[in-house]
Amino acid sequence: MVRPSQQLHVERPVAPTRSAATVLLLRDTPQGLSVLMTRRSPSASFAPGAYVFPGGMIDPIDEASHGLAATRAGQTGEPLTQAIAAIRESFEELGLLLARRADGRMADASDIAALDRRPPEGQSFASQCAARGLRLATDGVFPLARWITDRDLSRRFDVAFLVARMPDGQEPVDRKSTRLNSSHT
């Protein structure tokens, strides 16, 4: 039995986890496999300045957007919601759009320019895509791992790590319109 007088830290309640998703966007290059990472703001409330894969919290609207996603056999429920969240976050953070037109072609620069990276209240990312005739390319997003942050942190996340191919012809651009570089592994 643990004695309170022998603990290094005061015992406190464990913070609940928040569902999140992140995606490793991969691209073949002449130098080898390229994996996209971005740097969090130095003033971020969680992991400031850290290099991360694009992603973030799962929103209730992600689950409500299942009908706007192209899926593969068995891709339903929570894994589909996670893929939608990862696609939405990649677009919001880096302007990368994993979506297809009705003819099967991936979204292009004109589609990206027509969408609001921070849609106005009452309009979701997925509904913007649907209005342009785009379906979210969740069928190309695959589960890789799951990570739950340490129980002693004041903010905790249950994160689905996903993997997808970076769309050809698209380059990451942060919200301030700065081109980003990928890292090679």
Image (cartoon, helix red, strand yellow):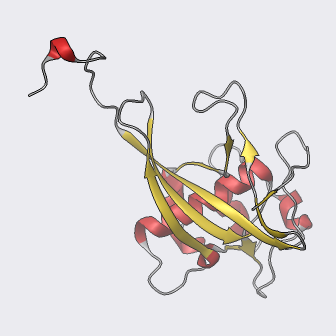
Return the x and y of residue 77 as percentages of the image width and height: 41, 69
Hey, which residue is sitting farthest front in the picture?
A: 6
Q: Residue at (67%, 37%) from the top-left corner?
A: 50
- Which residue is at the front of the view, 34 or 180? 34
Q: Is residue 64 visible?
A: no
Which quadrant of the structure image shows residue 15? top left
- Which residue is at the front of the view, 178 or 34? 34
Q: Residue at (76%, 86%) from the top-left corner?
A: 104
Q: Is residue 22 left or right of residue 3?
A: right
Residue 122 position (above or below residue 138): above
**How many numbered callouts?**
0
Q: Residue at (66%, 74%) from the top-left corner?
A: 137
Residue 68 position (above or below residue 46): below
Residue 175 position (above or below residue 100): above
- Which residue is at the front of the view, 2 or 161? 2
Which quadrant of the structure image shows residue 171? bottom right
Query: Can you say which quadrant of the picture contains the N terminus?
Result: top left
Q: Is residue 33 visible?
A: yes
Return the x and y of residue 31 as percentages of the image width and height: 88, 69
Query: Can you say which quadrant of the picture contains the C terminus?
Result: bottom right
Q: Is residue 61 left or right of residue 128?
A: left
Q: Is residue 10 left or right of residue 178?
A: left
Which quadrant of the structure image shows residue 126? bottom right
Residue 48 position (above or below residue 118): above
Hey, which residue is sitting farthest left in the picture?
A: 1
Return the x and y of residue 86 as percentages of the image width and height: 61, 58
